[in-house]
Image: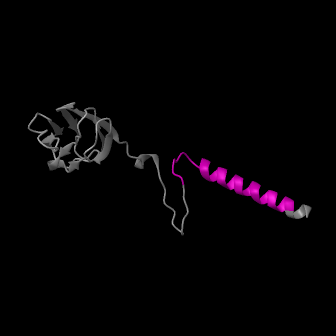
Amino acid sequence: MVYIGLGALAAIAIAGFVFTKTMNKGSSTSIPITQSGATPTVSASSIVQIEEIIVSGDEYSFSPATITLKKGTTYRLTFKNTGKAPHNYIVPDLGISTATIKGGESVTVEVTPQKTGTFGAYCSVGNHKDLGMEGKIVVE
């Protein structure tokens, strides 16, 4: 019985040693993951930073009215309804369309512009666009 306990303890010690050596090997930040025979790795250079942009909307404007983005860069765009009426944020030429949300709510979409230019943004609820609820996105 003592030999079985010592054998189990030795196996745990060896596994811990192998794990520590694997994690500290070289200066790589890759973490090996084994699943169904595959060994994918994730490295620090493959992690994408996503910039956050916040646009607020109320009766009947956006703040900021103009935002500038870079082509090919991914952004997390949050639309916050700071008004009382339902609003949304639509930029059809860039494929951006948030849900229509109530006052006090927010909604987030990810955006990666693929073309440069100046694109109109607006609220598509009722006649909000006609009342001045417009803005623009400039993609450089």
Residue 74 drawn at (x, y percent): 30, 45
The outermost residue toward the right is 2
Q: Is residue 36 left or right of residue 13?
A: left
Q: Is residue 27 left or right of residue 84?
A: right
Residue 140 drawn at (x, y percent): 18, 39
Front in this rendered view, residue 1 or 82: 82
Instruction: Name the colour scheme.
Output: one colour
Give the residue at x 15% y 40%: 122
Residue 84 drawn at (x, y percent): 25, 34
13 in magenta: yes
65 in magenta: no
Residue 86 drawn at (x, y percent): 24, 40
The outermost residue toward the front is 84
Which quarter of the picture shows residue 121? top left
* Residues shaded magenta: 5-31
Give the residue at x 25% y 45%: 100
The relative height of residue 42 versus residue 75 in the rendered view (above or below) is below
The outermost residue toward the bottom is 36
Q: How many marks?
A: 0
The outermost residue toward the left is 130
Is the N terminus in the top left, top right, bottom left or bottom right quadrant? bottom right
User: Which is the main secondary structure of the residues drawn in magenta?
Assistant: helix
Give the residue at x 26% y 35%: 55
Front in this rendered view, residue 50 or 106: 106
The relative height of residue 67 versus residue 42 in the rendered view (above or below) is above
